[in-house]
Image (tube, rainbow, N blue to C red):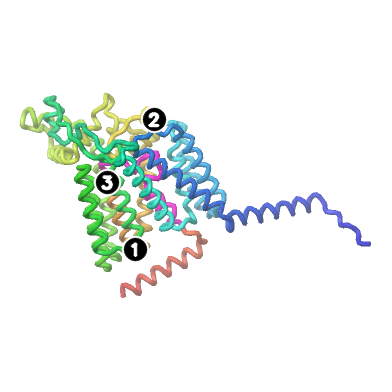
Amino acid sequence: MKKKRHISGAERFGMDGNMQKNTYRWLREESPVPRLAFYIGLTIELLMVIIDKSNYINPIEGYLFRVTFLLFACKILLTRYEAREWAVILAMEAVGFISYRVTGANDIIRVVTFVAACKGIPLKEALKYTFYVTLAGCLAIVALSVTGIYGDISLAQDFGHESLEDTLYVGEFPTVETRYTLGMGHPNALSCMFFMLAALGVYVWFERMKWYSYLFLMILNAGVYLLARSKTSMLITAAYLCGACLLTFVKGLRKMTIFYVCGLLVFVLCIAFSVDAAVCAQRVRESQWNEFFYLNPGDDEHIVLLAKIDRHINGRIVSLTNSDNNDGMIQTWSAFSCENNMNYYFDMGWVKLFYRYGVIPGILYVAANLFLLWRLWRRRDACGLALFVMFAVYTVVEAHLISVYIGRNYLLIMMGCSVRRTSSHSQQRLFRGEVLSLTQENA
């Protein structure tokens, strides 16, 4: 009779350890758990964006933010990262933790976790899903409004399109206008969501776009403008559609480095203009006052130019001086912001980035955008460049992308999904192959 072999505690521990490793490897590489965790979290984030655009106040928003954070953290734990990627993730999470301790807001921690969780998710797949969920949500809001079930179809108020001098300095009552919101709460929200959906849709299906697709979107853009009367969104949408159309039919332009350099210059100009506006807002206000009352701005050409630009963007620069503390101006910025900066809102997105989250997180976000631009250049992703540039310009005057709602900012998905699931040697071989391919194409 065979004797039963005695298994020592050390051997049993080793067997249990191997079983745990195999289970973890299966969860990470073969099970649907990581993808499910990511897409459930993304769905909740997108639904919160839709709810925010409606008239409904979400009473459990804070709890949902925690749920999505845990889901994305679960995805990170079930994803393979290189040592340098872990170093970047932990460093950015440390910045987020400092911001949380200073301001009480966990936005940066959530954003870093989301971007890291995007690794291993195909970019176009994630963006298509984002497009469909956002489109369905927006159509539901419009349908509920038009049928009278929920939400206002229009809004009557002053939209700030009269002369600033008459309303601000003389004190005349502004003219009340009626504009359509279709359940979105504000006409600007309606035009903003159309721009975001049009931009995302063109990017996702860029290779399949036809001339009549662009014509249809341009007609829709004109229709949304007639309803909402938002010039900013209309002009930026038109510029994006024209640029994407040009890149569709003149394919040789996609590989020209000069366009990516121009995109970089536009991005830097947007940041520089926003910082300049935050520095000079008070002088711009005084210049407009002096010009109206004394026919002399009483300042240099630089301030006069800013004052003219401010009139074309509906007083967004001067709006930085509306509070007692001039919230938004550069003297209210700090390294990691402060708790008081969490509750004041204005339209200029890049200014809001540095004011609300601090100079150091703001610089890191700008650096992440530059890294994304570099990746777009490496892939010769021309439509991605057009999307990147238009989002940068739009953020100068609108703060839609700089928000607690992760689902608003499609660039975050592009940042995370740009990371390849390959080793460093594989990446080097892939990069050499890309360079060789581009060289052969150019030849």
Local secondary structure at mark 2:
loop
- Residue 160's place in the image compared with 363, above or below, is above
Instruction: Check residue 394 in the rendering and tell me which mark sits there, or answer none.
Output: 3
Determine which of the numbered discs, if any, sits on residue 262 in the image.
none
Closer to the camera in the image, 307 or 4 = 4
- Asked whether the viewer can see residue 298, the reply is yes
Q: Single out the mark in the foreground, 1 or 3.
A: 3
Q: Residues within 10 Å of mark 3 (few under 14, many from 20)?
A: many
Q: Amino acid at mark 3?
A: Tyr
Q: Is residue 102 visible?
A: no
Residue range in magenta is: 394-419
Say whether disc 1 or disc 3 marks the residue closer to the N-terminus.
Answer: 1
Q: CA distance from mark 2 to mark 3?
A: 26 Å
**SS for tag 1?**
loop
Where, by quadrant of the figure, is residue 313 drawn?
top left
In the picture, measured across the screen, residue 424 lies left or right of residue 278, that is: right
Where 215 sits versus 300, above or below? Answer: below
**x then y, percent, for residue 417:** 44, 55
Given the image, on which type of amino acid does mark 2 rest?
Answer: Cys
**Disc number for residue 338:** 2
Are discs 1 and 3 less than 8 Å apart at CB? no
Circle 2 packing at 10 Å, graded few (<14), some (14-19), many (20+), is: many
Cα–Cα span, label 1 and label 3: 23 Å
Q: Residue 230's x, y, as percent?
A: 21, 43
Residue 380 is labelled as: 1
Magenta span has 431?
no
